[in-house]
Amino acid sequence: MATRAGHDLAAHLRMLATHTRQLGHELDLVGDDMDAAVAVLPPYRSPAPRHLQAPAAPALTTTPLPAAPPANALPAHCR
C-alpha cells in the first residue's frame, strides 16, 4: 500500500465495504418489515391449493414378474 495505486485500491475497497454494509442493513430492515406484514399459517392449518390436482395413480402392469432362478443354479461362491 506504499504506492498511489495501493492507496486508491484501499480507498475503493473501503467504499465497497461501506456500501455492502449499508445494503445489508437495508435488507435487514426490509426483512423485518416483511416479517411483520406477512402472516404465515403453520403447515397443518394451510389450505390445500385448489389449482393443483392430485397426481394420477400409476397404471398397474399386467405382465408377471420373471421367476427367480432355482437355488442350485447359483454358483457355489454365492450360496
Image (spheres, rainbow, N blue to C red):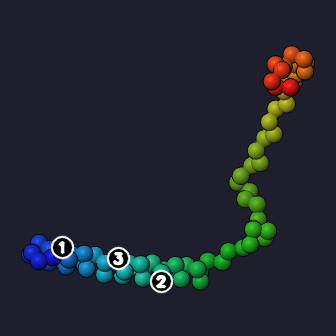
Image marks 2 and 1: residues in contact by CB distance under 8 Å: no
Q: Tag 3 or tag 1, which sits nearer the N-term?
A: 1
Q: Which residue is mark 1?
A: 9
Residue farthest toward the front in the current orientation of the protein: 77
Query: Could you tell me which secondary element the residue under label 2 belongs to?
Result: helix
Q: Is residue 36 left or right of residue 60?
A: left
Image marks 1 and 3: residues in contact by CB distance under 8 Å: no
Q: Which residue is mark 3?
A: 20
Q: CA distance from mark 3 to mark 2?
A: 14 Å
Quadrant (top left/top right/bottom left/bottom right) for the C terminus: top right
- Amino acid type of disc 3? Thr
Q: Tag 2 or tag 3, which sits nearer the N-term?
A: 3
Q: Which residue is mark 2?
A: 29
Q: CA distance from mark 2 to mark 1?
A: 30 Å
User: Is there any visible trace of residue 63 in the rendered image?
Assistant: no
Query: Could you tell me which secondary element the residue under label 3 belongs to?
Result: helix
Q: Residue 1: x percent and y percent?
A: 15, 76
Q: Residues within 10 Å of mark 3 (few under 14, many from 20)?
A: few
Q: Residues within 10 Å of mark 1 (few under 14, many from 20)?
A: few
Q: Residue at x 41, y 78 (%)?
A: 24
